[in-house]
Image: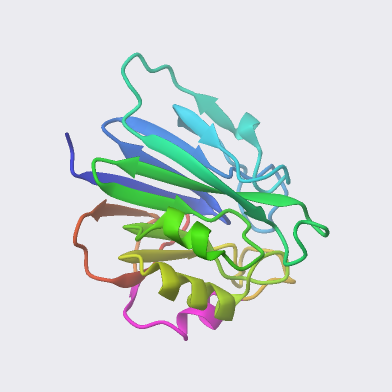
Amino acid sequence: MADKITVTWYGHSCFKAEAEGYSVVMDPYADDNVPGLPKLRVTANQTLCSHGHGDHNFTAGVETAPWTGENPWEISWIDTYHDDKQGELRGKNRIHILDHNGIRLVHMGDLGCDLTAEQIGQIGKPDVLLIPVGGFYTIDAAKAKEISDLLDAAVTVPMHYRSETFGYPVIGTLEEYTKLCGNVVNYAGNSITITKGMEKQTAVLSHG
């Protein structure tokens, strides 16, 4: 069994996680929904969505590839809220937890609230944490840093922010988060390979 996973970012909150040839796409965004991002057309064996909004649930953009073996991922989830008013403003949000051979990936979706002590315990210590940082629709940079510190992931990947070329104008920038972080590593591409025992870092991926 391979002691590694590959994580690829397509922009916004959309990622693909791969292990042993099996791939899972999380939170695909709809055509012309997120300013500046190209239409999403990817292939995967499975699709997971944190909630029903168009920038996170465009399953039509993911072609499902056949698979005859066992799913190498153990997948679980925690239901949270998209806002800090118990879903009154934007409904529920689902955190997905993907485990493979001792490596844990956590995709926070559009988390908009604090985590309870029980939820923190359920999440544990991720090897890679995908967390929104832009605010307005989700937790903001300061709250994301607070939560990422609590979870103490080896690799934290910020998502759901804006740059000069993409993203919703009302949300915050990547830099609002990274200026709070130590050991920020900028990757030239949009993929990262995760193994156990990686140097603790905030990993900035380039979508493309």
What percent of the width, then of the height, locates residue 133?
57, 70
Q: Position of residue 123 (x, y in %)?
A: 43, 55
Closer-to-camera residue (23/80): 80
Q: Residue furthest front?
A: 118
Magenta residue span? 173-185
| Residue 99, horizontal then vertical, whole percent | 34, 43
Q: Nearer the viewer, residue 185 or 3?
A: 3
> Considering only vertical position in the picture, is 149 above or below 40?
below
Please identify the residue farthest to the bottom as the structure is shown. Answer: 179
Q: For residue 165, what is the image quadrant?
A: bottom right
Judge from the rendering whether residue 196 lies leftward or rightward of residue 70; answer left or right: left
Q: Quadrant of the N terminus?
A: top left
User: In the image, what residue occupies the spot 72% across and 70% down?
Assistant: 136
What color scheme is it? rainbow
- Asked whether residue 180 is drawn in magenta, I would say yes
Magenta stretch holds residue 49: no
Q: Position of residue 134 (x, y in %)?
A: 62, 71
- Which residue is found at the position 40% from the left and 55% from the top? 190
At a point 68% along the width and 42% down the height, the residue shown is 30
Q: Residue reaching furthest top? A: 68
Residue 142 drawn above or below residue 69: below
173 vs 122, nearest the viewer:
122
User: In the depicted view, which residue is nearer to us: 154 or 59?
Assistant: 154
Question: Which residue does the image show at 43% across and 72% down from the upper left?
Answer: 150
